[in-house]
Image (tube, grey):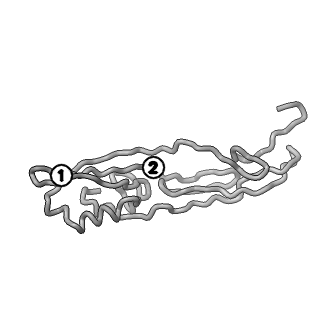
Amino acid sequence: APPNFSAPNHKGAIGVTPDSVEGVDVVVPVYQFSETYVFASSAVDGAYKAALFYLTGRVNDDTFRDFAAGEVLFLGAGGSKRGDGLWEIQFRFAASPNATGLVIGDITGVNKKGWEYLWVRYKDEVDGTAKGIVKTPEAAYVEQVYYEGDFDGLGIGS
């Protein structure tokens, strides 16, 4: 910084302009995995297909594959009936870790599940050292953007 200049303290806000906070895109830890199972033809009936449809785009409501509730998103299933009459189905998942004790500016103790969405509201505040108005975090919000589902309905164990 030039002499006699104090940089404004935006308390962690990135890309601050006079009107807004632009933020930045970051890579979020996500582990994608798939599992393939073979089912008897009688097991893959209309009710089972409906269960797969219903659970697609939902997060686990209980521990699943050693991941805590809220960490696994079911991306869907696909498969086909083989020549021997059995169904081969691949299940796709993405896991993102739950977070506790997050700190955003002066806001502490923020908890969010892996697939919840965290966003921040900013306020204008006077920075006496920098002699100007700065945008600082005022509130943190955690939103549920995916419904929870009981992955027992997938029929592949927990």
- Mark number, residue 129: none
Q: Give 109 or 125, whichever is nearer the viewer.
A: 125
Instruction: Kindly identify the residue that appears in the image at 37 percent across and 64 percent down.
Output: 149
Q: Position of residue 51 (x, y in %)?
A: 29, 65
Instruction: Kindly identify the residue that appears in the image at 39 percent across and 62 percent down.
Output: 61
Q: Give 107 or 13, whichever is nearer the viewer.
A: 13
- Residue under numbered circle 2: 96
Mark 1 packing: few (<14 Cα in 10 Å), some, or many (20+)? some
Residues at badges 2 and 1 in contact (C-beta under 8 Å)? no
- Mark number, residue 38: 1
Q: Give 44 or 122, whichever is nearer the viewer.
A: 44
Mark 2 packing: few (<14 Cα in 10 Å), some, or many (20+)? many
Q: Position of residue 106 (x, y in %)?
A: 70, 53
Give the answer, above or below, for where 145 lies relative to 3: below
Instruction: Kindly identify the residue that appears in the image at 24 percent across and 48 percent down.
Output: 36
Of the 4 image quadrants, the one containing the N terminus is: top right
What's the amino acid at mark 2?
A: Ser
Element marked by disc 1:
strand
Q: Is residue 117 left or right of residue 17?
A: left
Q: Is residue 27 left or right of residue 67?
A: right
What's the amino acid at mark 1?
A: Val
